[in-house]
Image: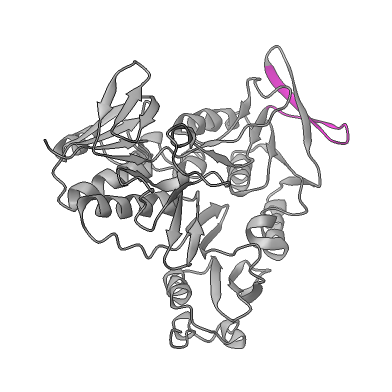
């Protein structure tokens, strides 16, 4: 009997796993199970071009049905997996089962919800799926009062789209600046200034106690100090929760941060089971510690690692976390990882005020852990190589715009 691979989750990570199996010459059956009623699609446009109305939702679809048929990939949409037996079967919600030799968990994440009165009202949104994006885009077209809960990446991208659509926007954030945990206060303030210059109102150090409405539809948001802000649209952007329930029920190792524990090939301790994308906590050969990343590039690149491993090729994992965002006329790329206990310093080359700069996070032993390039292009690949090299850098040269990024690394240690 041919070797059968079942992939649970038809997002980017699952689709990329299936693609790679075929490009690596794997000839057995490949079954891709997706819970949504859509073929696999890319998520970044959902908070950018699709939300802004610049592109149609179908533009996010990775391949049409004919492509999957031509590559003999059996895509089954609208299929809910209710149980996983790591010995070799998955069970669907209609009671049927599918046998496998290898299974890949690409179950992704879901938007976190707040346990608050009023979250069920019409006009309250999260943004995770293509349907979420279309519904929110239509709501923003009415040009009303928009309240965003959370000043993270999704919150800021939605704020930009809402302002460009002509809405009044208020962002409620319990911390002192946007993205404090992700980039720190100095760079968080750069994002704050950007949005304030475009008319966004922030309420820092504040929180939401409830959402109020009339006749089933949202009319306002009540904050900790008792203020009720008018709202025609409320968007909750407080992070994502990995979909690890199948893994937990199957007895797989899931760490305290919610990730399915895998090695650098994306394989769990069970040789039949792999995990990719948002749900995987994978050993990073470059960073030399385990990571779990929810950004787009993680889904884009971990699927191929698993696909190569399953097909019997060299997995070749030299991945470094990567993320990008577009807000108004600002574009930014980020690569690397900065552990909270790293003791890293921030080195800036360029001008924060003009929002044209590179920021480097540098460890106490002078290694570059991460780099952020704002409105500065063609530098992210050299930054990645600098991170991979683990080379000691001269901080003065690092902050000097006259020194090419490609010339910063000393010989690898």
Residue at screen point 11% across, 35% down? 1
- The foreground one among 62 and 21 is 21
Count of numbered labels shown in the rendering: 0
For the record, the magenta segment spans 217-232
**Left or right of 186: which side holds 252?**
left
Q: Tell me, yes or no, if residue 78 can be seen here.
A: no
Residue at screen point 69% across, 53% down? 178
Rendered position, 410 above or below 246: below
Q: Tell me, yes or no, if residue 41 can be seen here.
A: yes
Rendered position, 397 above or below 128: below
**Left or right of 4: which side holds 226?**
right
Q: Residue lying farthest right?
A: 225
- The foreground one among 400 and 362 is 362
Q: Main secondary structure of the magenta part?
A: strand
Residue 300 in the image: state x and y as whole percent: 37, 51
Residue at screen point 66% across, 74% down? 345
């Amino acid at each position: 009997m041919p070797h059968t691979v079942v992939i649970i989750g038809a997002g980017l990570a699952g689709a990329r796993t299936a693609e790679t199996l075929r490009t690596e010459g794997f000839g057995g059956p490949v079954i891709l199970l997706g819970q949504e009623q859509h073929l696999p699609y890319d998520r970044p446009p959902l908070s950018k071009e699709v939300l802004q109305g610049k592109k149609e939702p179908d533009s996010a679809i990775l391949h049409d049905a004919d492509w999957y048929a031509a590559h003999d990939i059996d895509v089954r949409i609208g299929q809910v997996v209710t149980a996983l037996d790591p010995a070799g079967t998955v069970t669907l919600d209609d009671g049927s089962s599918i046998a496998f030799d290898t299974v890949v968990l690409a179950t992704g994440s879901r938007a976190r919800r707040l346990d608050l009165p009023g979250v069920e009202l019409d006009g309250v949104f999260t943004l995770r799926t293509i349907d979420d994006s279309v519904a929110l885009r239509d709501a923003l077209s009415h040009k009303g009062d928009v309240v965003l809960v959370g000043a993270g990446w999704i919150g800021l991208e939605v704020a930009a789209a809402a302002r460009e659509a002509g809405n009044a926007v208020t962002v409620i954030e319990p911390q002192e600046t946007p993205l404090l945990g992700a980039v720190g206060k100095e760079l968080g303030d750069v994002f704050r200034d950007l949005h304030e210059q475009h008319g966004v109102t922030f309420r820092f150090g504040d929180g939401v106690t409830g959402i109020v409405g009339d006749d089933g539809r949202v009319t306002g948001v009540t904050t900790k100090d008792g203020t009720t802000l008018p709202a025609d649209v409320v968007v909750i952007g407080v992070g994502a929760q990995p979909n690890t329930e199948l893994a937990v029920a199957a007895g797989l190792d899931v760490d305290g941060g919610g990730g399915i524990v895998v090695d650098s090939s994306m394989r769990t301790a069970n040789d039949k089971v792999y995990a990719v994308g948002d749900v995987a906590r994978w050993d990073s050969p470059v960073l030399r510690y385990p990571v779990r990343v929810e950004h787009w590039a993680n889904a884009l690149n971990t699927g191929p690692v698993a696909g190569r491993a399953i097909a019997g090729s060299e997995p070749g994992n030299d991945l470094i976390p990567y993320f990008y965002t577009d807000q108004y006329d600002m574009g930014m790329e980020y690569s690397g990882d900065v552990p909270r206990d790293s003791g890293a310093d921030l080195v800036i080359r360029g001008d924060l005020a003009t929002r044209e700069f590179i920021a480097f996070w540098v460890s106490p032993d002078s290694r570059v852990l991460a780099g952020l390039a704002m409105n500065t292009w063609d530098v992210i690949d050299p930054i990645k190589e600098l991170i991979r090299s683990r080379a000691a850098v001269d901080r003065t040269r690092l902050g000097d715009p006259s020194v090419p990024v490609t010339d910063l690394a000393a010989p690898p240690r």
